[in-house]
Amino acid sequence: MARKSGPTILQEELYPSSAERVREEIDGARLIDLDVDEESPFLRGQKRVSARRSSLPQKTANRLLWAVVAALVLCLAGIGSGALYRYGERSWRFRVESSDNIEVTGMQNVSKGQLMEVLGGDIGRNIFFIPLAQQKAQLEQIPWVESASVMRFVPNRLKVEIHERTPVAFARVGPRMALIDAGGTLMELSPKRKFSFPVILGMNPGEPLSTRAPRMKAYNELVQELDSGGARYSQDLSEVDLSDLENLKVRVNDPAGDVLVQLGSSDYLNRYKIYVGHVQDWRQQFQKLETVNLRYDNQVIVNPDMEGKLKQAALAPAVARAAVAAGVKPAALITRIGPHDRALPKPAFELTEKKLDPKAAAAKKPVVRPRKTKKAVARSKAVAPKKIAAKGPAAGVKKVPQSPVAAANAAVIPKPSPAIARPAGGAAPN
């Protein structure tokens, strides 16, 4: 290499710049890093410096922090809820002040008195402490109420929704007249509405609902079948006797006279049409048409003997007036007594067998009367005029002697003629 001809050496050559020095160090470090993987026996092992760490992991610490925050929030919420509960319990704003705060819908036949017997105790009570389920159950105990619901509205209002039962007939139960629904539940007569139903007979006082239910099922089938043709024959009925489910009896409210028609236990419409088609002919053949038995196929019995029919208790005048106001037909209010139900009047006196038997009368020994002395005869003559004057014409009483035969004839009541029974013969249609 040729030496420079210059006499001096430049300063940059003797002392390189700092930038170049740093660059050289970086390049040397890179070379060292590349050779680290190769372990050299001449180099010392690198000493690891321990890092200072926390006693709890970071994830656990975060969880603890969130738990503390949640507990604080719940504590504040509990304190707020307690304060709100005490306010709602003691504040006058949440009390039912009067019946004006109780709204009732669907009430037509239920009286306000029956409603207040259940809800009257809630007046003055806190709205949050009214037992809604208990009040609902008590409202459904009212005969007219089929279902009910009770709701509370803040601050102090109750809303009651009532669904009433639908009556289908009147029911005569002993001396009582009531309305009855399709399931057999009895309801009091409503003074607000007037109905046009027949009266059902055969319901006994104190019988359970399970006994009335099958009878009402038979009644519903009867009405549906009579009205199925569109003629609405059920409106002609004043009574329906359900005492015998094998033979339903209906009383037809005919202007010419009511007639008891026996329809059996099935095929009610066709049997009733037989009655409608031949009732005028039967009225011409019989002096009085009372009963028609159509329960047998291809046979009609007119005015049969009605022994053992159901006896109904007489209605009180107040009950009869209420029934007429409710729409009961007058023909259903008459208490009928059959020929076998009439009681004989008590005779004025009774003739013994000895008096009616002539042999016993002939064999009767005469009574020996003692003879009166002269003093007794004179005393009786002196007293006799006074007794006659006291009990005779002045008293206005006249005694007519009556023979034993006439008295016996007066005590005997003529027996009613037996009912006329006639097979249908040509009266029944083919």
Image (cartoon, rainbow, N blue to C red):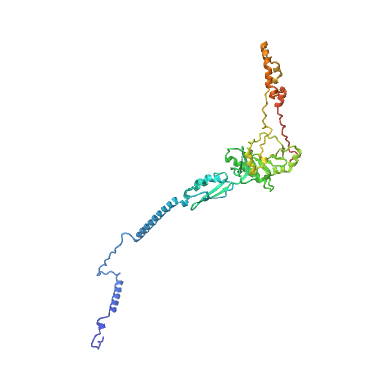
Q: Nearer the viewer, residue 311 or 162?
A: 162
- Spot occupied by residue 417 in the image (x, y as percentages of width and height): 72, 32
Q: Nearer the viewer, residue 57 or 284?
A: 284
Q: Quadrant of residue 328?
A: top right
- Spot occupied by residue 387 in the image (x, y as percentages of width and height): 67, 19
Q: Quadrant of the image for the C terminus?
A: top right
Identify which residue is drawn at 34% across, 59% down.
61
- Spot occupied by residue 342 in the image (x, y as percentages of width and height): 67, 32
Q: Quadrant of the image for the N terminus?
A: bottom left
Specify whether 410 is left or right of 41. Answer: right
Q: Quadrant of residue 254?
A: top right
Q: Residue furthest top?
A: 374
Q: Quadrant of residue 322?
A: top right
| Residue 201 visible in the shown view | no
| Residue 116 visible in the shown view | yes
234 versus 9 height, above or below: above
Q: Nearer the viewer, residue 388 or 238?
A: 388
257 versus 155 height, above or below: above
- Spot occupied by residue 207 in the image (x, y as percentages of width and height): 58, 38
Specify whether 206 is left or right of 285. Answer: left
Q: Nearer the viewer, residue 62 or 312?
A: 312
Identify which residue is drawn at 44% across, 50% down.
90
